[in-house]
Amino acid sequence: MTNTVAIGIQWGDEGKGKIVDLLAPKMDVVARFQGGPNAGHTLVIGEQKTVLNHIPSGILHDNILSLIGNGTVVDPFRLVEELDMLLEAGIPVEQRLKISDRCQLILPYHRALDAAREAAKGKGKIGTTGRGIGPCYEDKTARRGIRLVDLNASNLDERLDEHLKYVNFMLVEFLGAKAVSKAEVMVALDLARERLLPLVADIPLILHQHIQAGSNILYEGAQGSMLDVDHGTYPFVTSSNTVAGAALAGLGVGPKDVDEVLGICKAYTTRVGAGPFPTELYNADGMCDAKNAGKHMAEKGQEFGATTGRPRRTGWFDAMVVQHAVRINGVTGLAITKLDVLDGLEEVKLCVGYSYQGERLLSIPADCAVLDACEPIYETLQGWSENTFGLTDITQLPAAASVLLQRIEEVCGCNITMLSTGPDREHICHLSSINT
């Protein structure tokens, strides 16, 4: 039996969807434990591209149960759109999916608050996806949220009236935005009753039964560790815990029910939205390094957000970030994606430390202003001209690519166990370590 947590260990967009889809055939259950429709997990099978926001990436496989845990926030409109997309593609999603009755619902006023707050911040905006994630988690923590289990509660109407008074006061009086009508909210609640309530279940009980039966379970996270609300680059973070430990609270399982933690990261680094990024080379606002390596990565890697479509900022691999993620997640193996994007670069750099005011730092500073002022300390390695796209045999890697991967293992203190060389399922190398 192997129960594995699969998480991103940079700033998201690491290729988690593909890796989870690759692992899924070995699993009996794939369970999503946090985040919401701000996540975009892209699966490419042949020429068919599927982007999933709520639903676990194992949904495309027969005989695998997909679960959405209580740590996930659910937008009824977007989740139903996702269900319908899969049904139209011939995927019997309603037979394969169960949703926790404790999931919090993202409602129209959450999206309105999200958009209005970002607009009011102007240049100081965080760069949220505008999907209402933050306001929904805020309501959850304040104990005023509406869960799937509450849809048939006798006091729901009263609770909604009271909350709308507060929400619309904030929207109109403080943010200068339009009020949200109760009718808009009721449309979302009615849709959830019709399409989502038939899928609800006691997720901790289901997982406990599978654990007792010796099933293989994959716990799937969203975003990346550097966007964790506690351990990431606060306040430029998401509103949930994205680390491996969140799988326990977000699904209702215990520490003994996790055997492995797979940390997924690119062979370089990307980030969407605002916030510090020490190794940044390129962004859509015109920042570009002298040798155009960052632009090369952005264009060849097709770095646009799967959910938002926003251009991603790109830069060299930051081992300080990955070291930090390995520690806080207890990562037992690395999955490196998009190695092929580095093909054709004359040199490749690896950030092995930060310098701040003349001193070398040993860890990621908690203060974003300090991190933003850090200078990366680079090792410069030889690039390669050979094509690694689609390689499945580790022995066929260019020598220079092998050297880079060996240094990543050494500096990050963790073995590489999977290497992705393209978007398709078949573009993968399985290994115990690049050094073996």
Image (cartoon, rainbow, N blue to C red):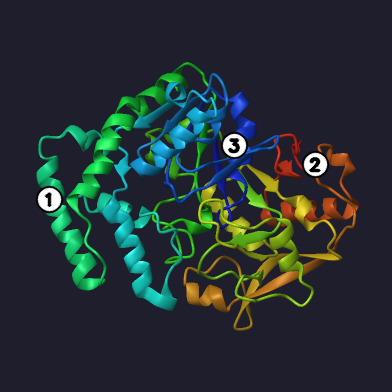
Q: Are marks 1 and 3 in contact (CB under 8 Å)?
A: no
Classify the position of the C terminus by image quarter. Answer: top right
Instruction: Depth check: give the residue in front, 116 or 137.
Output: 116
The image quarter containing residue 421 is top right
Query: At numbered mark 2, what does the secondary structure look like: helix, strand or loop?
Result: loop
Task: Please indicate whether residue 148 sits to the left or right of residue 302 in the image.
Answer: left
Query: At numbered mark 1, what does the secondary structure look like: helix, strand or loop?
Result: helix
Task: Please indicate whether residue 297 sits to the left or right of residue 80 in the image.
Answer: right
* Residue sticking out furthest to the top: 213
Q: Which residue is mark 2?
A: 390
Residue 198 in the image: state x and y as whole percent.
Answer: 31, 25
Instruction: Depth check: give the residue in front, 188 or 247.
Output: 188
**Which residue lies at the image location 55% right of the left edge and 61% below the top edge?**
310
**Which residue lies at the image location 69% right of the left edge and 59% below the top edge?**
268
Task: Please indicate whether residue 327 sits to the left or right of residue 385 in the image.
Answer: left
First-in-chain label (1 vs 3):
3
Q: Which residue is mark 3?
A: 20
> Disc 1 to disc 2, how far (Cα)?
56 Å
Q: Label 2 amino acid?
A: Gly
Q: Label 1 amino acid?
A: Asp
Residue 195 in the image: state x and y as whole percent.
Answer: 33, 30
The image quarter containing residue 323 is bottom right
Classify the position of the N terminus by image quarter. Answer: top right
**Which residue lies at the image location 40% right of the left edge and 39% below the top edge?**
79
* Residue sticking out furthest to the bottom: 357
**Which residue lies at the image location 51% right of the left edge and 18% below the top edge?**
214
In the rendered structure, find residue 161 and report the number of the disc placed on it: 1
Residue 319 in the image: state x and y as whole percent.
Answer: 66, 60
Task: Please indicate whether residue 216 sits to the left or right of residue 98 in the image.
Answer: right
Query: At numbered mark 3, what does the secondary structure look like: helix, strand or loop?
Result: helix
Circle 1 or circle 2, nearest the eye? 1
